[in-house]
Amino acid sequence: MTTPLDEMIAEFEKADDYMKERELRAKRIKMPADPEAWLSNLEKKLAEKLPQLPEPVRSEYTELMTDQIKTARNWLALGEQAALRTMVALLFDNYNLVLHNIDRKDAAPARKGRSAGGQSTAEQKQAEAEANIAQVVELWEKLEAQGRPERERAGIIANRMGRPIDTVRRWVKKAGLR
């Protein structure tokens, strides 16, 4: 049985593992020769790219990236190279996520076009159903003219059309014949 203390310790261990992985990733990244110029350039690129994102994502990324750039500048001013390297790696990853989200937003119309197949199929089926209802009305009126009782008409129509009787009954009801 786990206690709340065990859960808290496990959570801290996960956070610690995450930070160790972040630091290892930061060690593999190539630091820019002039970090201040790189941060300024990143701010310019973000000013161009962030307006292309939809609003809830844009405000979140703006706040996140602004805070991270400010933190990176603080680490640069303090001369903390290890912390600066970690922030540069994080900024690099987040900038790539911004670019990825912009690409996904730009690809959305293409994805929407692919999903239109279901709409066109629905329209075809609806037109087909309307044609079937018109045929049922025509047959219903012929059978009525022949003097067939109402209770037999749906069964006869179902046999002639090769459709289930319940389907024909629904069509009769939609046509307002019953």
Image (cartoon, grey):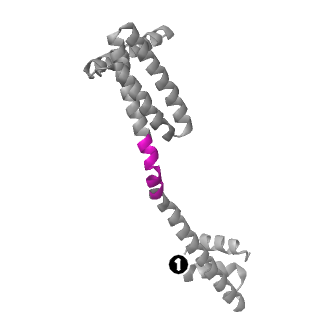
Residue 18: in sight, yes or no? yes
Q: Quadrant of the C terminus?
A: bottom right
Front residue (pair 54, 50): 50
The image quarter in which residue 157 lies: bottom right
Residue 31 appears left or right of 121: left
**Up-down relation of residue 42 to residue 138 (above or below):** above
Observer-nearest of 20 and 139: 20
Residue at image position (60%, 70%) is 167
Query: Tag 1's secondary structure?
Result: loop
| Residue 151 shown left or right of residue 6 in the figure | right
| Residue 152 colored in magenta in the image | no
What residue is shown at x 44% (from left), y 14% (from top)?
11
* Helix, strand or loop for the magenta stretch, by majority: helix
| Residue 49 image offset from top left, x and y in percent | 45, 37
Which residue, given by chain and number where applicable, does mark 1 sit on? Answer: 162
Judged left or right of residue 150, residue 22 is left
Residues packed near mark 1 inside 10 Å, few (<14), some (14 to 19) or many (20 plus): few
Image position, residue 56 (x, y; %): 56, 35
Camera-side residue: 165 or 13?
13
Residue shown at 32% from the left, 11% from the top? 81
Tag 1: residue type? Gly
* Magenta segment includes 106: yes
| Residue at 47% in and 33% down | 47
The answer to whether residue 1 of the structure is visible from this angle is no
Q: Position of residue 144 (x, y in %)?
A: 71, 87
Specify the segment rendered in magenta. Answer: 102-113
Identify whether 13 is placed above or below 57.
above
Q: How many marks?
A: 1
